[in-house]
Image (spheres, grey):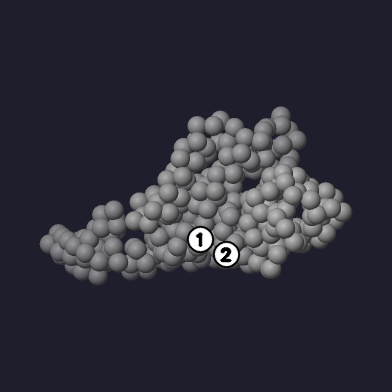
Amino acid sequence: MSRIIGFILVGLSGWGLASIFSDSSAKAILIWTAAGAVAGAIFAPFPARAFQRWLNREMARVPSSTFISGMVGVVAALVVSGLLSLPLSLLPGLAGKLAPVVAVLVLMYLGVVIMTTHSKTVAGIVDTRMLQDKRALPAQPAESPRALLDTSAIIDGRIADIGRAGFAPGILVIPKFVLEELQYIADSSDSLRRQRGRRGLEMLNKLQKEAAVPVEISDTDYKDADGVDSKLILMAKATGYPVITNDFGLNRVAELQGVRVLNINMLANAVKPLILPGEEVDLRVIQEGKEFGQGVGFLDDGTMVVIEDGRKYLNNKVNVVVTRVLQTAVGRMIFAQVRNGASRDRMPKP
């Protein structure tokens, strides 16, 4: 496509230069036009790719109000230059040919600069106009909120239960580059990674079939960004959508760049039942602890409980009393001790 555009544009430029600087003979115009078209077809892809990378990078950084103001400035400049083109073209000689082009370029530059400088004022006028229209018209349903879904959240699978319970933020947007990473993991030579990838694909299929969790696939991509995390952050900044993830690294980087993050692990920790020191809990001692004599058990929600002197009750169910509750970066940790030193299943070994 860039070769075709270059062929046409540079060919037209050659025709224009021939009409300005040459003797305007048919042969000269043909040579200039053909030379421009061939040059455009050969060299156009190189600046086109660089321009596309630059444009994607800059567009992700430009606020919506500034972009809209700039477009208003361009349209205003084109209208004014269109009105001036006829009188300027009547100037004698070369000035009559160059003046309309120069006027368009100068007016577009001034229009963009002036409008983007006062973008907040323009946005305020547009907002006021929209509020007036809303008062005049019947209330319309608001657009459903959207959130970007990360690969880790898809593989985790709990997002389906969250959506089924009605706590999903709205439409779940899955970018195409996330699907590609998921497919890459599912095709990995490592059995564990392959299993995780296939689980993610199954979970995605399950999400798409459940009407309670609407899923939208986005073709938006950022070719110049390295890695899925960078692309997700760029897309979140461009759209304003939050990112749903379980990735601790992505969570931190996104927060540093002002992107809202919905962390499923933090949600799970927030809704766990609150256990206070002094409460009694029945649980089975599953394994030994790190310290001598300790045992480890788990609550129904997966919270780890470290039991002092619980090693001798290994593989037995005991009644424990909570002594301490610690909130760590990875979750809640509970310390307890066996009540009355007796097992629910059988007495400890001597």
Left or right, 284 with respect to 175, comes to right
Q: Which image quadrant: the C terminus?
A: bottom right
Check disc 2: other Cα within 10 Å, few if <14, some if 14-19, many if 20+. Answer: few
Q: Label 2: state its secondary structure.
A: helix
Q: Amino acid at mark 2?
A: Gly
Look at 67% across and 40% down and name the residue there: 167
- Residue 189 at x, y percent in the picture: 34, 56
Viewer-side label of 1, 2: 2
Q: Is residue 308 visible?
A: yes
Look at 55% across and 36% down and name the residue there: 214
Out of 65 and 70, give the one closest to the viewer. 65
- Residue 132, compared with residue 242, is above or below; it is above
Could you tell me how far apart the alpha carbons at marks 1 and 2 are, in whole angstroms?
9 Å
- Residue 165, compared with residue 57, is above or below; it is above
User: Marks 1 and 2: CB-CB under 8 Å?
Assistant: yes
Closer to the chain start, of discs 1 and 2, is: 1
- Residue 235 at x, y percent in the picture: 52, 55
- The residue tagged 1 is 229
Which residue is the extreme one toward the front? 350
Look at 21% across and 64% down and name the residue there: 42
- The residue tagged 2 is 249
- Residue 100 at x, y percent in the picture: 41, 62
Out of 342 and 135, give the one closest to the viewer. 342
